[in-house]
Amino acid sequence: MEFPDIESLFDRYVIGNYSRHPIAFVRGEGSLIWDSDGNRYIDLMPGWGTTVLGHCHPRVVTAVQRQAGMLLHVDNTFYIPPQGELARELSEKSFGGKCFFCNSGTEAVEAAIKLARLSKQDEGRFKIITMRDSFHGRTMGAITATGQEKYHRGYLPLLPGFAHTPMNDLEAVEEVVDDETCAVMLEPIQGEGGVRVADQEFMTGLRELCDRNDMLLILDEVQCGVGRTGEWFGYQHYGIEPDIMTLAKALGSGVPVGAMIARAEVAENLVPGTHASTFGGNPLACAAALATLRTIEQEGLLETCRETSEYLFGRLEDFREQFSFIREVRGRGLMCGMELDRPGLPIFQHCLHRRVRINCTHDTVLRLLPAVNVPRELLDHGLRVLLEALEKAEHGEI
Ligand SMILES: Cc1ncc(COP(=O)(O)O)c(C=O)c1O
C-alpha cells in the first residue's frame, strides 16, 4: 500500500487522538526500521522504549511463532504454563515477589493502586503520594497519579486521595504523609517527565519513610525496567527494594504485556474477585516476555547496555560542552535525556528527516532510548546526524 492510501485510511476511519508523522513503518530488524516507501531509518527510540532488543529479535520471533502454533490464548480460569515460568523469572530477578499480569503499563499501575488500597483498607488508609512531572499512564487512576496537569485537563473530577510532591524532595513527601496515606509511588527515572533520575538519598529516605509509617513503596518501572538501565530493574541501582513494582514496555519486546510484582505478604490481598484481566498473562504474551528475559541473560545484554551507556553518555557530554544551549545531560543506562534551553522539536524533526529517529519529551528534552544491543556503527551514525541538527540549531538554521 502506498503512503497516501494508508494516510487516507487513518483520516477516514481512525480516531485522531495521536499526532502522527507522515511515515508508515512496515518492517524492522534490530535498530533499523523501514517505511512504506522503502526508506531505512536508524531507530534510537524503538517503540517508545518497548523494543529493548531491537526490532524483531530472532529469539523473540521464534518463541512467538512456536507459541502461536500451539496455543494463542486461554483464560485465567485455568493454569497457563508460560505465565508460571515468567512469574518465576521475574520474581527471581527482582525481590522474590509474586506477579499479576496485564497488557500495558497503565493497567500495571492500576493494579498497583488497587492493591495498595486493598492492603490498607482495614486501617482506613487510601491516600497515595506521587511525584510532580511523573507519568503513570492514561486510565483514570493512572492519570490521577500522574503529576502533570496537562494530562488531567477535561477529565475532572479525578480519583480522591492523591497528592503530588516534587521529585527528590523528601521533606515535601514527609509533610503530606498522614494517617490515611497507604503508599508512595514513583518512577526511579521519570521518562515522559524529562528523564529525571531519583537521587540515592531520596530513594533510601523514601524506603525508610515507608517502613516507619507502614506504607507501601511502589516503583513504576514501566519505562526503566527490564534491562534498560544496565540492571534488570532501575531500583537495583539503589540497594533498596520496593513493595510493589510495575513493568510493561520492554517486557514483551513489542508484544503487549504488563506486570505488577508485589511482596508475597502484600500480594496475598489480591484474592479471587478483587482484580482480573481477560488477556493478562496469556500464553503468547508470556512466551514473548520469557524470550526477552532469556535473551538479555544469555546474550549478556546488561553488560552490553552498561558499556554502550558509558560511550553514549560520553558523547552526549561532549555535545553539552560544545553547545551552550544544552543545559544538562541526564539518565542512566540507555535511558538518556538532553535538556535544552529551547524547544527540542526542530532538532527531532531534522533527525527524522535525515532518517534517524529520536524523541523529544517535556518540550525541551531530547530523549534517546536505543535498543540495548544497538550496534556501535548505527549509534555513531545516529549521533553524527544529531550533531548536525545541534549545529543547525546553534546557527538558527532550524
Ligand atoms: C513510567 C510509565 N508508567 C506507565 C506508563 C503507561 O504505559 P502504557 O502506555 O503501556 O499504558 C508509561 C508509558 O509511557 C510510563 O512511562
Image (cartoon, rainbow, N blue to C red):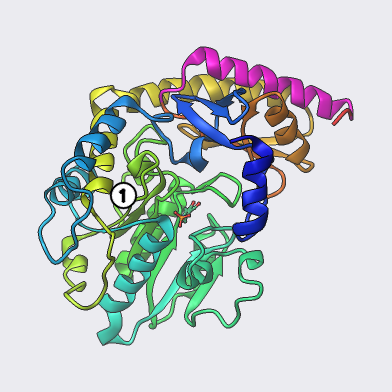
The picture places residue 240, in percent across and down from the top left corner, at 31, 49
Up-down relation of residue 175 to residue 293 (above or below): below
The number of callouts visible is 1
Could one spot residue 43 in this view of the protein?
A: no
In the drawing, does residue 49 fall left or right of residue 268?
right
The picture places residue 19, in percent across and down from the top left corner, at 67, 51
Q: What residue do we see at 49% from left, 73% from top?
A: 140
Whether residue 393 is in magenta: the answer is yes
Q: Main secondary structure of the magenta part?
A: helix
Depth check: give the residue in front, 372 or 131.
Answer: 372
Q: What residue would you read off at disc 1? A: 240
The picture places residue 92, in percent across and down from the top left corner, at 17, 44
In the drawing, does residue 23 fall left or right of residue 379?
right
- Residue furthest toward the top? 377
Q: Residues within 10 Å of mark 1 (few under 14, many from 20)?
A: some
Up-down relation of residue 124 to residue 12 (above or below): below
Whether residue 211 is in magenta: the answer is no
Q: What residue do we see at 49% from left, 65% from top?
A: 130
Depth check: give the residue in front, 366 or 106.
Answer: 106
The picture places residue 273, in percent across and down from the top left corner, at 21, 78
Up-down relation of residue 148 to residue 154 (above or below): above
* Amino acid type, mark 1: Ile
Range of magenta residues: 373-396
Could one spot residue 275 in this view of the protein?
A: yes
In the drawing, does residue 26 fall left or right of residue 287?
right
Quadrant of the drawing holding the C terminus: top right
